[in-house]
């Protein structure tokens, strides 16, 4: 059964990804021959000419590249607050960092990338969905809904 997707979440079909063989140019932990400077990182903001597209400031948790070249960024958040209504709420306090991550995922989507915000709940009392907490961080909640 597929869960209802948040606006930033795109469905991910991994059937064309080969977990045994990383995409070209991606180093693995066991590849000792790759220099640290060759290991790709998620976009880091740098001074750029005005003609270039802006890039995110943060390092995104996971970066995948489909064989077709399509990039997919995944940001993972740990939701540890579940209310009596059975739903999980994130964040449990103001989190400028989490809001920035959502805005950066939206930027990547606008540039043609696929992006997913994955909320992990490690509790047995979650009986609903994870929702942005407008009570604890209205900025994050607005960022998720825009």
Image (tube, helix red, strand yellow):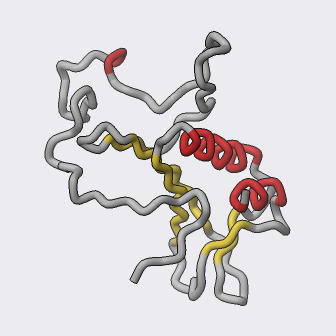
Asked which quadrant contains residue 23, the reply is top left
Point 23% across, 50% down: residue: 17
Asked which quadrant contains residue 38, the reply is top left
Which image quarter is the C terminus in? bottom right
**Residue 143 falls left or right of residue 66:** right
Point 58% across, 45% down: residue: 105
Q: Position of residue 47 (x, y in %)?
A: 64, 12
Q: Position of residue 59 (x, y in %)?
A: 53, 35
Q: Position of residue 120 (x, y in %)?
A: 51, 66
**Residue 43 falls left or right of residue 84:** left
Q: Position of residue 33 (x, y in %)?
A: 18, 19
Point 27% across, 31% down: residue: 26
In the image, residue 135 above or below residue 110: below
In the image, residue 82 above or below residue 40: below
Out of 34 and 8, give the one closest to the viewer: 8
Out of 82 and 105, give the one closest to the viewer: 105
Point 65% across, 81% down: residue: 87
Asked which quadrant contains residue 14, the reply is bottom left
In the image, residue 124 above or below residue 134: below
Farthest-out residue, left? 20
In the image, residue 146 above or below residue 73: below
Which image quarter is the N terminus in? bottom left
């Amino acid at each position: 059964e597929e869960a209802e997707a948040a606006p930033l979440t795109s469905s991910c079909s991994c059937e064309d990804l080969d977990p045994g063989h990383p995409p070209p140019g991606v180093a693995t932990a066991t590849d000792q021959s790759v220099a640290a400077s060759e290991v790709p990182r998620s976009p880091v903001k740098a001074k750029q000419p005005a003609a270039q597209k802006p890039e995110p400031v943060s390092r995104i948790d996971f970066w995948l590249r489909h064989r077709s070249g399509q990039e997919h960024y995944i940001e993972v958040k740990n939701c540890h607050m579940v209310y009596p209504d059975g739903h999980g709420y994130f964040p449990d306090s103001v989190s400028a960092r989490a809001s920035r991550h959502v805005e950066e995922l939206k930027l990547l989507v606008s540039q043609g990338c696929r992006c997913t915000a994955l909320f992990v709940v490690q509790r047995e009392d979650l009986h609903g969905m994870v929702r942005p907490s407008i009570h604890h961080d209205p900025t994050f909640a607005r960022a998720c809904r825009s």
